Image: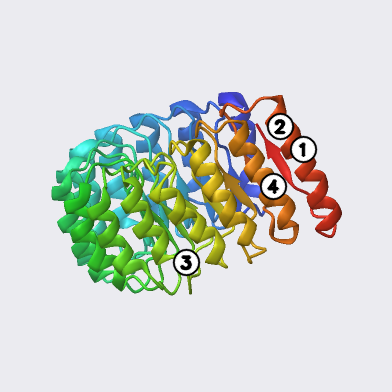
Amino acid sequence: MGRLGVAQLTEVLPTCALQHLKLHTNNLGDEGAALLAQKLSGNGLLLSLDLGTNGIGDVGAAALAEGLKLNTTLQKLDLSGNAIDVSGARALAEALAANTSLTSLTLSDNYIGVEGAKALAEALTQNKSLAELGIKGNELGDEGVEALATALLSREAPLKLLDIGNNSLSPAAAEPLARLLHGKAGKLVEFNMYMNEVGDAGMAKLAPALKECKSLKNLDLGGNDAGPEGAAALAEVLVSHPSLTLLELGYNPLGPSGAATITGAFKHDTKLEVLKLGWCKVGGGEGARALADLLMFNNSLVQLDLRGNGLTNDGAIIISRGLRSAESKKLAELDLGYNEIKDDGACALAQALKANPECAVRELKLNANYITRFGQVALTEAVDMVYEMGAGKVLTVTF
């Protein structure tokens, strides 16, 4: 779109009843952001504005901040993937302190840093409306996250979503975050701490607070260097969780015993629909047997990600036994990519699908394995069998 396109858009914006405007990846730059900002201050209809990945820097952020100070209707603003630095964050913080309508702010993948986080934290103590904050990928560090956590905890407003993934956190960040989760447990629906390094010690601190988050639906703790001890701490508090539907634990060195602990927590009486255990060093023995049990007994999962776990043929054969005995018809996607599975494993999976067509998955992903034409033919025959014997169920297998 560029500057010319946004200039034309701003001419008609005041005359239309537009409530949601998505301009993601349109090369608006600071000039385009400034043009939009001029119309933002007086707009009384727009509810959401997505300006992600538009090359907006501090100048554009400052212009938008001025518009936000006067706007009284905008509820959701997305500025992710831009080039906003500390000064832009400070300008937005001033606007946030004055704004009374914004409930969701996404600043992910910018350059806000510790000082920008501190400015936003101070503004949050004055703001009374914001309930969702996305600020992943900003190099906030322990100091910046602690400032934000302390500010969010001090507010009376509820916290529904917090995304602080990929911010170079250490185990020290877990303590202020645990206090925040404990204090704001009632309304929290989504918590994302993906790709930090809080480790087992951090998980042990977070776990009791997570137990109190009864409304939590999406929990992302992937890539946090959590091993068997961290898995045990999480499993203890997440078993029979009343609302959790998505759990991401990929890129953690859980190992066979950690995987067994986690899957054991979700074998029975669970609402979990998506479980991601990719690249968790599960292996083809104890861990694979735990996964087979999960497939056999769980009746809620819709998606299971097991990529990159070194399952090999042995693990695939063990998992096939779980598929053969599964009773749930809900599992739609099983991802076994990057697991060094060869033809023997592929044939075992094919036989399991043929033996249990009514409960067969709808999509089996086997990308980046070592399956030759022989194994592919066996799985193709299984696809046909599932269709014929499974009341027309369509199974897709990708290699």
* Cβ atoms under marks 2 and 3 closer than 8 Å: no
Q: Nearer the viewer, residue 226 or 80?
A: 226
Q: Residue at x 22, y 54 (%)?
A: 229
- Mark 2 or mark 4, which has the lower sequence index? 4
| Residues at discs 4 and 3 in contact (Cβ within 8 Å) | no
CA distance separating discs 2 and 3? 31 Å
Residue 351: which disc? 4
Q: Is residue 53 above or below residue 42?
A: above
The quadrant in which residue 82 appears is top left
Q: Position of residue 348 (x, y in %)?
A: 63, 43
Circle number at residue 267: 3
Which one is nearer the viewer's eye here, 287 or 239? 287
Marks 1 and 3: in contact by CB < 8 Å? Answer: no
> Which residue shows up at 62% across the image and 44% down it?
13
Three-letter code, disc 3: Lys
Q: Position of residue 358 (x, y in %)?
A: 74, 61
- First reached walking from the N terminus: tag 4 or tag 3: 3
Say which label, 3 or 1, has the lower sequence index.
3
Callout 2: SS: helix
Q: Which tag, 2 or 3, sits closer to the chain's start?
A: 3
Task: Determine which quarter of the picture holds residue 184.
Answer: bottom left
Which residue in the structure is indicated by mark 2?
A: 376
Q: What is the x, y in percent for residue 133? A: 36, 53
Q: Which residue is mark 1?
A: 380
